[in-house]
Each structure stands twice: as structure tokens, then as C-alpha cells.
Image (cartoon, rainbow, N blue to C red):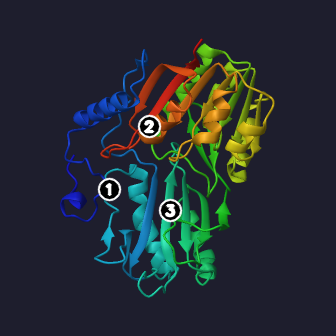
Amino acid sequence: MHCALFEAGHCRSCTDLRVPYAAQLQAKQQRAMNQLALPSVRWLPAVASAEAGFRNKAKMAIGGSTDAPLLGLVPLQGEPADLSDCALYLPAIRAAFPRLREFIRDARISPYELTTRRGEGKFALLTCAPSGDVMLRWVLRSTEALSRIQKHAPGLKASWPALRVHSINLLPEHKAVLEGQTEILLAGDDALCMQINEIPLYLRPQSFFQTHTTVAAQLYAQARDWVARIGPSHLWDLFCGVGGFALHCAPHAQRVTGIEISSEAIASAQRSCAALGIDNVRFQALDASAFGRECTDAPDAILVNPPRRGIGVALCERIQLSGARDLIYSSCNIDTLDADLRRMPAYRAVEARLLDMFPHTAHFETLVWLRRSG
């Protein structure tokens, strides 16, 4: 796929952009198979992505000036680059960028300067749901621009009905993170509804969600199909986030327990439960590793979807000794997945599937169903 931003050297995020997409997917599949080296596993066909127009979230640094803002990359050294023409974003996100620039001018949001540590606007974060509704978050250094943003926010909402969630996030520290702890809702709802396979998942401003909605839907559906074949009486969903896996799998398990450290994500998952009228799922805001070690209500199936660091030694040992017959592991990091599976030799892989959540990069999602041997 041709990208003028890549060719000009403005953005190098898509490291494999010059590789034909079919070859990218084949290389990822081969790497997963070779690295995991799972004996007797059945690899299902890899889930491919569209080459463009798939990314549901934009994380844009604010640069330039108040009167001529740019949205994209603002490095400590070198020239800022406007990435609003990036072809990876959903069309609705690309269409929104002119509105964001106009709002920056109207509300007089001065771009934050890395060298002087002055200015207010650090990032504009935009997320688009399958319905076309959007969530817009402004990451600011302080509340200096708050009153002006509040003044102009109703006008933005009136001219942009798709704007469902609008907020300010405060990040006063000068450090390499995307957001701070404080969130100020401006108008509208407190969560964006991501309708996935007829399951409403509610995304609050600081909650995590997959950036590729189409592939995420297939990820959840694959796990659901495996759980339907397993038919567990009690399923643990560890690192459950806003409940995507748990809610998809609920019809095929007698009980589901979802564990996630983020109370915001758990509140969203509970809202989905209420909307669906599901009564066999219980969500708790707890540390998944600690819960796995301490809970005595043992499951017969476990699903884990950890961050890139994996589930780690302690939780691997707990699962190894748990007695659970089936384990489903969803991973965005093949290296930590490989390490974790080697720590649980009691389990043998039954089926596995690669899902290309991150086209044009070396990254991908891997879903593995394992069963206790013997």
C-alpha cells in the first residue's frame, strides 16, 4: 500500500508497509507457528485485515500553533508531522480532523511545546464506534483552557451529532505518557457504545479497547465458539476489560466470573450485563493475578487476555495447579505468550488462530485453546 507520509519519512509506524499484504500475513503466520511450535495443534486460517480504513482510534499530538494547529507527531527534535491523512483510520475519524482543528482555534488551545514545557494542548484522542458515534478527549497540561472549551463545547456538539462522549483529561506532568488520572466530562454520555456481534460494550474515557473493531469481533467470536464446544460450568475471564470475552461466552457457560483491575472497565461491563439482561456473569474490580492465586471457587475453564507483558510466573503456576481442564489464551505479544505456555506444561494446544489486528507491522493477535493433558 502506498503512503505519502511513509515515503516522505514523516511517519514510520507501519514498518512493513512496502511488503505486499498477503506476504505480511503469511510471514506472521509462519512466525507464530515456528515460535510456539505447538505439537498436534490445529491452526485455523488466519484472520486477515483490510489494508486501510480499519483503525477505530486516533492518538494525535497537538502541534503547530493555535491559529494553525496540526494533528499527528510532535517529536522533541525534528519537524512536527500532520498525520490527519493517514489511511489507516476509519473514514469517520479522518473526516473529524478539520472539526478538531477548528475547535482548537475557537477555544484558543495553545499546543504544548516539549522544549519549553509551555502550552496546554498535548493530545486529541478520538475513538469511533461501529455506529459512527465518536468519543473525543482533549489531554491538557492544566485547566487554563477549560472555561473556553466549556464555552465552545455545546456548539461543537450541535454541529456534530455523532459526538457522543466529550471530555478533558489533565496531564500536568512532563512525561512520556498519553493521559493523566483526572477526567472532566463536558457533555453527552459517559461511555461510547461499541456494538460488537450484537453485544453492547461500553467504553469509558480511560478504558482499553482493541483498535481494530472488525478483527476484535472475530476474536470474540472465535473464543465464543471454543467455549461453546467446551461447555464449562464455571469460566474465569481474567484481565476481562469491558467484558468482551465474558459477555460473548456467557450463553455457553453456567457461570462466568470476569476480573479486571480497572473499576471503570468493570462499571462498563456491568452496564452491558444490565442492558442484555444477563444474570450468570459476575464482574469484579480486582487484580487478576492476585485473584487467580487466592480464589477458592475453582473454574473448569479459564480465559486470559493479558497486556503485552503476559500473565507471568505466579499466575502460570496457579493455572498449572488449578485443575481447570481448558485454557484459552489471547495474546498480542507472541514472545510472552510463548514464555507463559512453556510455564504450563500440563496443557496441550488443541487449536490456534492468528488474527491480524495490526496490519503493516510485525505485531499480531494470537488466540490459543489448550486442554489439560492426561
> Residue 222's spot in the image, x, y percent?
51, 25
Q: Depth-wise, is mark 3 or mark 1 nearer the camera?
A: 1
Residue at label 2? Answer: 365
Which quarter of the figure has residue 28?
top left
Hey, which residue is sitting farthest top in the picture?
Answer: 374
Q: Amino acid at mark 2?
A: Glu
Closer to the N terminus: mark 3 or mark 1? 1
Q: Amino acid at mark 3?
A: Leu
Residue at label 1? Answer: 13
Q: Is residue 269 left or right of residue 306?
A: right
Please tell me whether residue 94 is drawn above or below residue 193 in the rendered image: below
Which of 184/48 is in front? 48
Closer to the N terminus: mark 2 or mark 1? 1
Residue at label 3? Answer: 125
Q: Is residue 119 left or right of residue 271?
A: left
Q: Is residue 275 visible?
A: no
Q: Amino acid at mark 1?
A: Ser
Please tell me whether residue 137 is drawn above or below residue 112 in the rendered image: above
Say what secondary structure mark 1 lies in: loop
Please tell me whether residue 74 is drawn above or below residue 239 in the rendered image: below
Circle 2 Cα neighbour tier, 10 Å, few/some/many (<14 / 14–19 / ≥20): many
What number of labels is visible?
A: 3
Which of 368/258 is in front? 368
Which of 74/323 is in front? 323
Any mark on residue 179, and which?
Answer: none
Separation of residues labelled 2 and 1 (CA atoms): 18 Å
Q: Is residue 154 left or right of residue 362?
A: right
